[in-house]
Amino acid sequence: MDGILGTLSTIFDTFGSAVFVPVMLYVIAMALGTGHKKAFFSAVYAGVGLVGFGFVINAYIPLIIPAVQSMVEVTGIQLDIVDIGWQATAVVAYATKAGMLFLGVGLLFQIALFLLKWTNIFQPGDLWNNYSYMVWGSLIYVATDNMWLALACMLVMNLYSLLFSEVLQKRWSKYYGYENCTIIQLHHVGAVPFAIGMNWIFNKLGLSKIRWSPENIKEKLGFIGEPVMLGLILGLLIGLLGNLKSLGTLAAWGNIMTIGISTAAVMAVFPRVAGLFSQAFTAITQAARERSVKDGSREIYIGVNDATGYGEPATLISGILLIPVIVVVAAIVPGNSILPLVDLIALPFMVEALVAIMNGNIFKVVVSGTVWFSMGLVVATKFSGLFTQVASQFGVELPSPDALVTSFGILTKPIFGGLIFPAFLNQSWLWIAVLLIVYFALWFWLRKNKEKVHDYLERTADGDVPAEG
């Protein structure tokens, strides 16, 4: 069994999402009857889009990370737990026995849920991000030495994350402009209930009148409000904060200008790449709609990589604005010992659910993101010792023998880490039973009220009051 799972992992690591996703889209397109030509071009555009996203993001992130790290160092904040980033966390997840088990079982589970019509989301469209389940399962296995308990934890988390994705699917698809697509990553969709609640509070307090969307900013500020100009300004700001100690040098100003221009470039180039990626789903969504009208079947959504939303103007702006905010928050939140570092630049990924539900209102996203990640820091602090134990066993080099590490981007999850994970960690069967009862109750409720839920999110996204009745 380990050999089979190891082979599967090797194949996936070798070809990556840029090959796996097109293959799966081709299969889906053929199953929907699009024909070989349309199915083939859907697959190719998906691959081209994913590679394009990779080019843009992988060129931008390494450039800005040193400035962000320098900005953190300038603050002089001393916290005990170091953020090693989602990349290192993913490597650890794929190396553990629990992770390897979920690689195979989880894939079959997700396909079965789709084929049995338990969900209308085809989750294997983004296999790579299954590592988020694997991390939590690996922690359970190391703590309890019970593989079945670890697997159960991962599967329950998968059920909840899919439920949240179904709530989000229409709103995310409409906001980001990818027909019948949605994000399905556990480390992002866990914010959906919180985002809905926060948006309701904003609307009740009348704070939705503060409209900091890219469109409104452009309208008020003219050319300065253009996404490219905003990207330039924000990039220059991060560059300045990251070079405060060396502003008297030519190299510092060269770095500042480079970060500014690079951030502006992401704003300019990203929509073009997104346009290519969206073409991958045109034939599929058309065929799916024709079939659903013909035989009354469900509307299908495809889970896509979170990179599809990273460079959207409100998303990137909100994420960048949150970088210095989270650094300050980490220093003052009671119960936190984590120094956010590597994953700070991942904040645009991490706010996508908030951005979609709040319709790109940057003010709402930054305020709610501050609250959400503050709670997450406290949750992740509690399990840092266990995570460090797992990470050290699988190749992560600790800064010192007694150092503690974590992943700000993956483990700061109040719902999954604060409510679901402890039930399995403590082997509380009553707590686990309650989680399952709540899940099935929510699942049945959503089946009957999905259209109403989606309609509510559409009406309230921009602060409007839902219609009566």
Image: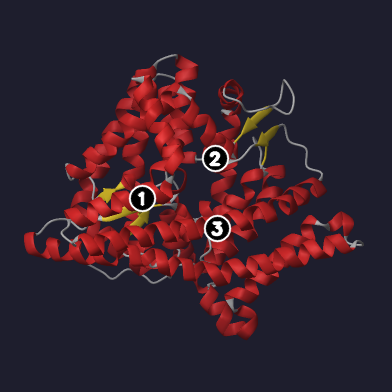
Q: Write down the quadrant of residue 377 in the picture.
A: top right
Q: Residue at x 65, y 50 (%)?
A: 326
Residues under numbered marks 3 and 2 in contact, where contact means CB atoms less than 8 Å apart: no
Q: Nearer the viewer, residue 464 or 377?
A: 377
What number is the disc on residue 55?
Answer: 3
What number is the disc on residue 396?
Answer: none
Amino acid at circle 1: Val
Q: Residue at x 81, y 64 (%)?
A: 254
Amino acid at circle 2: Thr
Position of 198 with respect to 408 (left or right) is left
- What is the secondary structure assignment of the residue under circle 1? helix
The residue beneath circle 1 is 21
Mark sitting earlier along the chain (3/1): 1
Per the model, the C-alpha gap separating discs 3 and 1 is 17 Å
Position of 99 with respect to 435 (left or right) is right
Mark sitting earlier along the chain (3/2): 3
Observer-side mark, 2 or 1, equals 1
CA neighbours of label 2 inside 10 A, class few (<14), some (14 to 19), many (20+) = many
Residues under numbered marks 3 and 1 in contact, where contact means CB atoms less than 8 Å apart: no
Q: Residue at x 49, y 40 (%)?
A: 414
- Percent across and percent down for residue 12 are 41, 38
Amino acid at circle 3: Phe
Q: Write down the quadrant of residue 111 in the picture.
A: top left
Mark sitting earlier along the chain (2/1): 1
CA neighbours of label 1 inside 10 A, class few (<14), some (14 to 19), many (20+) = many
What number is the disc on residue 412?
Answer: 2
**Would residue 343 be seen by someone viewing this image from the given angle?**
yes
Whether residue 344 is situated above or below residue 462 in the rendered picture: above
For the rendered model, the colour scheme is secondary structure
Per the model, the C-alpha gap separating discs 3 and 2 is 27 Å
